[in-house]
Image (cartoon, rainbow, N blue to C red):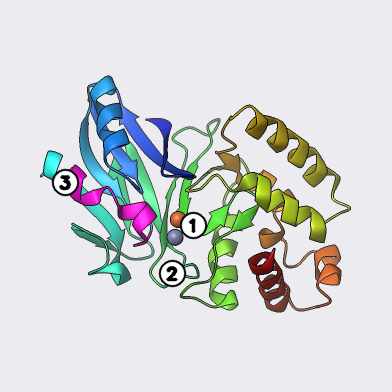
């Protein structure tokens, strides 16, 4: 399975999963249809599935037109998103599995950004390869999604599921927000040398219009303040000793940043 990034709208990424031998493809969170259709044409592949993480327009905006072009495709989404994802055919709960080509993905229930948000984790096929996490707007490189329909407690529980994945896991998040996220991170985790180094890397990449996605779980655990609610220096920065309160205060500060 090959994974390609298709930039969409102003800062979204649509991820295209491709099996060149079977000539099939799937997309994660198609913000728009046209760039996907164009890409499928160049690959000479048939679209067989849409994997939606949540119902927001910048993640499902391409569903209807893609279904018109490929009426037999399967549209996956969270069970609690029933009625909110156009054309949804499969309603997934935590612990369910999905398949594309020869990869099996685990469904994680990760409410917080929305009440129905799910993520897809495809474990590696061989021990020397990384797994792949499609996390929508729950975790971002250097940041996390806003809490539109969930509580800080829910979001910490959701993000903690990601923290428990292998460090090599590739993180395919749905937006190119990394540079701004790291600017905020530096304001609350100023003594983190690896964060400073990452900021320089990301600044250079963005100045050359290079994507910063995928990240890895290990890098996020070491440099993303929204996975570091139990690190003493971050708790000190927001004047709390409580993990959930630390997370909530960080999220509140970021909302104002
Ligand atoms: Zn969203
Ligand atoms: Fe989004």
User: Mark on residue 114?
Assistant: 2
Horizontal side of residue 7 vs 93, given as left or right: right
The magenta span reads: 54-66
173 is higher (above) or lower (below) than 148: above
Tally of marks: 3
Ligand 1 closer than 8 Å to label 1 CB: yes
Query: Looking at the image, which is closer to me, 95 or 39?
Result: 39
Furthest residue toward right? 191
**Quadrant of the image for the N terminus?**
top left
Horizontal side of residue 123 vs 60, given as left or right: right
Q: Which residue is mark 1?
A: 137
Can you give x and y, in whole percent of width and height, for residue 48 in the image?
20, 39
Q: Residues within 10 Å of mark 1 (few under 14, many from 20)?
A: many
Horizontal side of residue 76 vs 129, given as left or right: left
Query: Looking at the image, which is closer to me, 23 or 107?
Result: 23
Q: Residues within 10 Å of mark 3 (few under 14, many from 20)?
A: many
- The image quadrant of residue 205 is top right
User: What kind of element bears circle 1?
Assistant: loop
Q: CA distance from mark 2 to mark 3?
A: 24 Å
Residue contact at pointers 1 and 2, CB within 8 angstroms:
yes
Ligand 1 closer than 8 Å to label 2 CB: yes
Can you give x and y, in whole percent of width and height, for residue 142 in the image?
66, 51
Q: Would you say residue 72 is visible in this rendering?
A: no
Of mark 1 and mark 3, the one earlier in the sequence is: 3
Q: Would you say residue 100 is visible in this rendering?
A: yes
């Amino acid at each position: 399975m090959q994974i390609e990034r298709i930039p969409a709208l102003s800062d979204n990424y649509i991820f295209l999963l491709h099996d060149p031998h079977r000539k099939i493809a799937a997309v994660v969170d198609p913000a728009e249809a046209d760039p996907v259709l164009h890409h499928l044409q160049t690959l000479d592949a048939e679209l067989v599935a849409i994997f939606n993480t949540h119902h927001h327009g910048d993640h499902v905006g391409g569903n209807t037109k893609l279904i018109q072009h490929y009426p037999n495709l399967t549209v996956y989404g969270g069970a609690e998103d029933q009625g909110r994802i156009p054309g949804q055919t499969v309603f997934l709960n935590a612990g369910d599995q999905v398949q594309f080509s020869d990869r099996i993905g685990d469904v994680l229930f990760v409410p917080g950004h929305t009440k129905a948000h799910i993520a897809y984790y495809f474990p590696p096929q061989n021990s020397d390869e990384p797994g792949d996490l499609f996390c929508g707007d729950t975790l971002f490189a250097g940041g996390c999604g806003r809490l539109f329909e969930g509580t800080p407690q829910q979001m910490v529980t959701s993000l903690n599921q990601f923290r428990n994945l292998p460090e090599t896991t590739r993180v395919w998040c749905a937006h190119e927000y990394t540079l701004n996220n790291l600017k905020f991170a530096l304001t609350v985790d100023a003594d983190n040398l690896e964060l400073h180094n990452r900021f320089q890397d990301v600044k250079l990449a963005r100045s050359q219009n290079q994507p910063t996605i995928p990240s890895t779980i290990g890098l996020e655990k070491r440099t993303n303040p929204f996975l570091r609610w139990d690190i003493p220096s971050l708790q000190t920065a927001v004047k709390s000793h409580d993990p959930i309160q630390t997370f909530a205060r960080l999220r509140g500060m970021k909302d104002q940043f």
